[in-house]
Image: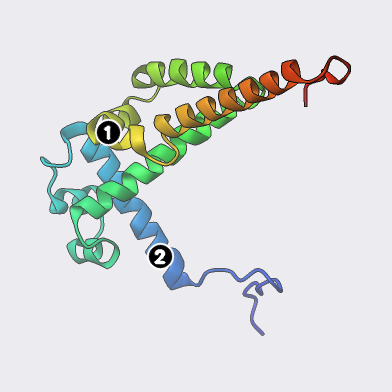
C-alpha cells in the first residue's frame, strides 16, 4: 500500500519533473540577478550564470534561448517585486497624487534599501520607465485621475443651482 500523498481533487500538484524544472529556472534567474547586478549583462557569460546557479551549462538552453531572454525574465521579476513593494507600502493611501509621490520617494530610496535590485533596474535603462507597470503607467493613471476629477468638478459647477452636487 502506497503512503504517497494523494492529489486533492481539483488542485493538481505539479509533477517531480515540473518542480525540478521550475527550481532550475529559479536558480538561473537568481544567479543572473546576482551577476547582472555585480557586472552587468554584457560582462556576464552564460557559463558564469550556470556555475553560479550550480546547474549544467545545457540547462540554460532548456529555459532560455539567449542571455537577453534571461535578462528579460530577471527584469520582469525585479519589476514585479518593486511593484508589489510599492503596492504594499501605499495600500492605505486613497489619493492618487499621494500614492505617486510616495512611490517616487520609495523608488528614490531604492538603491540603499535594495542595492541588488536597484543595480539591475539602473542597468535596464528606459525599459523601467516604459514598462506597462512602470513609472510612466503610474503617471498616466495619475493624469487620467486628475482629468476625471476636473471633468466631474466642471460638471458640478456648471449644473443649475438646484442640481449642484458632485457626481
* Labelled pair 2, 1 in contact (Cβ < 8 Å): no
Q: Is residue 23 above or below residue 77?
A: below
Q: Nearer the viewer, residue 55 or 1?
A: 55
Other residues around mark 1 within 10 Å, as few (<14) / some (14–19) / many (≥20): few
Residue appearing at x 32%, y 27% in the figure = 118
Mark drawn on residue 105: none
Q: Secondary structure at mark 2?
A: helix
Against 90, residue 69 (above or below) is below
Color theme of the render: rainbow
The answer to which quarter of the image holds residue 167 is: top right
Rendering coords of residue 141 (x, y %): 52, 31
Residue 86 visible here: yes
Relative image position of residue 15 (x, y in whole percent): 50, 72
Q: Pinpoint residue 154: horizontal percent, then vertical percent.
A: 67, 19
- Seen from the viewer's position, the closer of residues 6 and 107 is 107
The x and y percentages for residue 140 are: 47, 31
Q: Residue furthest right?
A: 162
Residue tagged by mark 2?
20
Q: Which mark is drawn over residue 126? A: 1
Which residue appears at 44% of the width and 69% of the height?
18
Give me the residue at 64% from left, 23% from top. Answer: 149
**Circle 1 — which element?**
loop
- First in sequence: mark 2 or mark 1? 2
Q: Nearer the viewer, mark 2 or mark 1?
A: 1
Can residue 93 be seen in this snapshot?
Answer: no
Q: Quadrant of residue 161?
A: top right
Residue at 29% x, 52% y is 28
Report the front residue among 137 and 60. 137
Amino acid at each position: 500500500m502506497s503512503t504517497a500523498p494523494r492529489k486533492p481533487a481539483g488542485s493538481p500538484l505539479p509533477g517531480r519533473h515540473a518542480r525540478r524544472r521550475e527550481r532550475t529556472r529559479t536558480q538561473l534567474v537568481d544567479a543572473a540577478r546576482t551577476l547582472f547586478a555585480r557586472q552587468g549583462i554584457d560582462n556576464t557569460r552564460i557559463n558564469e550564470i550556470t556555475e553560479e546557479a550550480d546547474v549544467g551549462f545545457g540547462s540554460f538552453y532548456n529555459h532560455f534561448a539567449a542571455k537577453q531572454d534571461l535578462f528579460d525574465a530577471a527584469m520582469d521579476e525585479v519589476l514585479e517585486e518593486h511593484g508589489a513593494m510599492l503596492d504594499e507600502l501605499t495600500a492605505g493611501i486613497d489619493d492618487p497624487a499621494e500614492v505617486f509621490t510616495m512611490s517616487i520617494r520609495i523608488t528614490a530610496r531604492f538603491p540603499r534599501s535594495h542595492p541588488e535590485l536597484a543595480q539591475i533596474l539602473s542597468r535596464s535603462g528606459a525599459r523601467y520607465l516604459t514598462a506597462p507597470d512602470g513609472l510612466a503607467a503610474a503617471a498616466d493613471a495619475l493624469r487620467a485621475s486628475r482629468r476625471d476629477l476636473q471633468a466631474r468638478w466642471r460638471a458640478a459647477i456648471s449644473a443649475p443651482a438646484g442640481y449642484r452636487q458632485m457626481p
